[in-house]
Image (tube, rainbow, N blue to C red):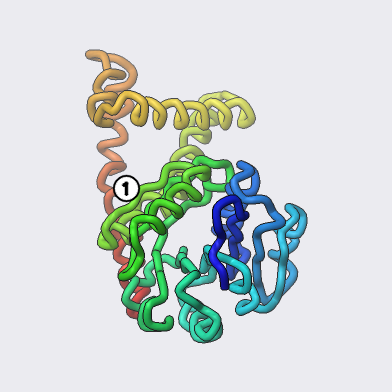
Amino acid sequence: MAAAGPGSPLRVGCIGAGKMARGVLGGLIVSGKVPGQDITVSAPSDTNLQYFRDHGCNTTHSNISVLYGAKVVFLATKPHIIPQVLVEISSAITSDHVIVSMAAGVSLQTLKNLVPSGARILRMGANLPCVIQQGAMVFARGPGVDQDEADMLKDLLSVCGMCEEVPESYMDIHTGISGSGVAYVYLFAEALMDGAVKMGMPPAISSRIAAQTLLGAAKMILETGEHPAKLRSDVCTPGGTTIHALHELEKGGLRAAVMNAVEAATNRAREMDKD
């Protein structure tokens, strides 16, 4: 397979058509970074493929055919499916391919053991907001992946949100804080909304206010570079409403519960490579 040359379109393949595939590929399509016509997606049934057909992508039920003509191939199946997928496509993997696994908890060593010698493998972590180009992504490269491939992947994914190269030891922690962390934030947003409803505010407006509060707070962290503790302190005034509210959160163990959640998700991701 010939690699894309200067001026040639970057062709992308994806095995798996679930939520994470939609998130990352949807971001590429919506941003215009990769046109749908240059993307091929495979899945065993038509159910999840319809989204990609609606966006002009090529679809197939044959995993191995995704590799023909593609430069970058994402593996977006459930982690326990990865080994059988790699065995299935192994004969078609060449040194021109850049294989990127999105599977939580599947190590680079496990991936390397299932592909031909010299195959270029990277491992990435993403989260659902990639689909609105507000994702938090990290990736780690396997042996033989040079700076050019790393830069290419970072450039490709940057349209989906923040993208950083990290040591592989951080990958499972990313799952704990970000991949799964989106759900923690939704739960907190729901609790804020429910609190407002309890006090007499209609759900529709309380939901919007809760969401905008979280968005604004997150942007303050990113744009000021301040530690969250400093920003939290700035909101508190002696004897005011915020310090009374924070006292209740501390009594409820919010900080410890969130830390425990990150730890539990990280440990589960680490265990998945051994299942």
Residue 64: image location, x then y, percent: 61, 79
Q: Secondary structure at mark 1?
A: helix
Q: Compared to 38, does 236 lie above or below?
A: above
Q: Which residue is mark 1?
A: 258
Quarter of the picture containing the C terminus is bottom left
Q: Residue at x 32, y 24 (%)?
A: 224
Residue 183: image location, x then y, percent: 47, 50
Q: Residue at x 47, y 44 (%)?
A: 158
Q: Residue at x 52, y 63 (%)?
A: 72
Residue 123: image location, x then y, percent: 39, 64
Quarter of the picture containing the N terminus is bottom right
Outermost residue on the front side: it is: 6
Camera sees residue 2: yes
Q: Compared to 155, does 97 lie above or below?
A: below
Camera sees residue 51: no
Residue 18: image location, x then y, percent: 60, 63
